[in-house]
Image (cartoon, rainbow, N blue to C red):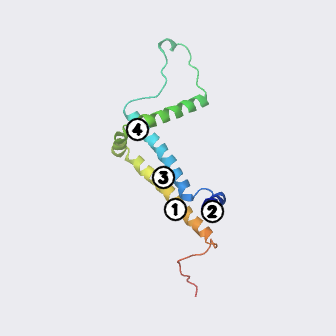
Amino acid sequence: MGAAKRSRERSADEGLPVMLVSAGVAAVLALLLWGVACAMYDNAQGYRWVMEASEGTESVRLRRSSGIAMLVSGVIVFVKNSVMYVPELFSVIGFVFRERFWFVIVSAILLGGVALAGWQLQRMETAMRSGNPFSRSGRTSRRG
């Protein structure tokens, strides 16, 4: 009971661990990057997610959709593509490495930046807990 109470008190004071937050940010970013990769693969397969006018509406002036409706439909298509291409995981990854290698580099840079930021925040948190956040532990001073 004492350990549980201490962990509750500690968690109330500290909040979420930095590494957990960094892992969450990396997971969300990875899901977004997966969705973009699926959209590129889908486009390369020749599929277009556009609304086609019916045959009798050529002479009728089509109304523009509202911005919110376009946003919602775009998010729905993005999520649908992301889920729909999970069974074709290796095909999508192979396509991205063969045809869109720049996307692999950009993804690695973004995910590496999240990892580096998490590592730096972890170091800063450790320094703040030590009592003197401005100390240079492990470094020698060059003062004469």
First of labels 3, 1 by sequence position: 3
Task: Say which mark, if any, is on residue 119.
Answer: 1
Whether pointer 2 and pointer 3 mark residues with C-beta atoms closer than 8 Å, the reply is no
Closer to the eye: label 3 or 4? 4
Q: Mark 4 points at which residue?
A: 86
Q: Which of 17 and 113 is in front in this view?
A: 17
First of labels 2, 3 by sequence position: 2
Q: Nearer the viewer, residue 88 or 36?
A: 88
Q: In which quarter of the image is residue 20?
A: bottom right
Q: Circle 2 — which element?
A: helix
Hey, what amino acid is under mark 1? Answer: Trp
Hey, what amino acid is under mark 3? Answer: Leu
Q: Circle 1 — which element?
A: helix
Q: Is residue 58 above or below residue 96?
A: above
Estimate the x, y position of residue 100 in percent, counting from the top left. 38, 44
Q: Mark 2 points at which residue?
A: 2
Estimate the spatial distance between the alpha carbons at disc 1 and disc 2, rounded to whole Å: 31 Å
First of labels 1, 4 by sequence position: 4
Task: Say which mark, if any, is on residue 110.
Answer: 3
Estimate the spatial distance between the alpha carbons at disc 1 and disc 4, rounded to whole Å: 30 Å
Estimate the x, y position of residue 105 in percent, counting from the top left. 41, 51
